[in-house]
Image (cartoon, rainbow, N blue to C red):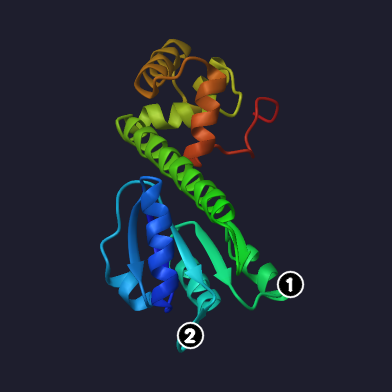
Amino acid sequence: MTVFVIDDDPEVLGSLGSLFRSTGLDVALFQSPEEFLAAEKPTTASCLVLDVRLRGQSGLDFQERLVAEGITLPVVLITGHGDIPMTVRAMKAGAVDFLPKPFSEEQMLAAVGSALERDEERREQAAGSDALQLCYDRLTPREREVMSLVVTGLMNKQVAARMELSEITVKIHRGNVMRKMAAQSLADLVRMAETLGIRDDTIHRFNI
């Protein structure tokens, strides 16, 4: 796990770096957002500790820039001049925590721990979604069509009528879908369809 720190105060950078390293975390220290953007990002869980007031620019502006560019790194903001509007703005942009200076080591470690946990969960979900997409990509076009109808709650005979197939053919396709998607039940398949965004809620068994 890696903690990135952006602060234009070398003393703050050094103390935070020592704190995080003492707990076994990897640390990367930067004095400007530009240095951070140019650096290689890890493939493991990570987060960013960001000072609100940086030389020549705003940490809040940079946080919003990260969001706009699709960089999903959890952010812990720190400042010596915080106020309620600033806190609200930070939280709306997705900050994990907003710590006013001076903060205790315990407060910082707790905030970073929450941020790293959030990023780890996000990465696990993304990996699961990628694996699910790979399974879906292995389906034939006909199997995908059967899946899209089955997950709306249609019975086999309704799917067969809609696709102009025999019911036995639909059963075969449905079995292939369950096997290739590694679905244990119809409810499991429905959850997968929702994750993939392929469920059509305008179709249900009573309007066929």
Q: Secondary structure at mark 1?
A: helix
Q: Secondary structure at mark 2?
A: strand
Compare marks 1 and 2 and give the one earlier in the sequence. 2
x and y, in percent, of residue 112 in the image = 50, 52
Q: Alpha-carbon neighbours of circle 1 within 10 Å: few (<14), some, or many (≥20)?
A: few
Q: Is residue 159 left or right of residue 45?
A: right
Q: Which one is in front, 59 or 160?
A: 59
Q: Which residue is mark 1?
A: 84
Q: x, y (%) of residue 128?
A: 40, 35
Name the outermost residue toward the bottom: 56
Picture quarter containing residue 143?
top left
Residue where numbered disc 2 is placed: 57
Q: CA distance from mark 1 to mark 2?
A: 20 Å
Q: Is residue 29 above or below residue 191?
A: below
Residue 152 sits in quarter: top right
Q: Residue at x 29, y 30 (%)?
A: 138
Locate residue 44, reporting x and y percent.
33, 46
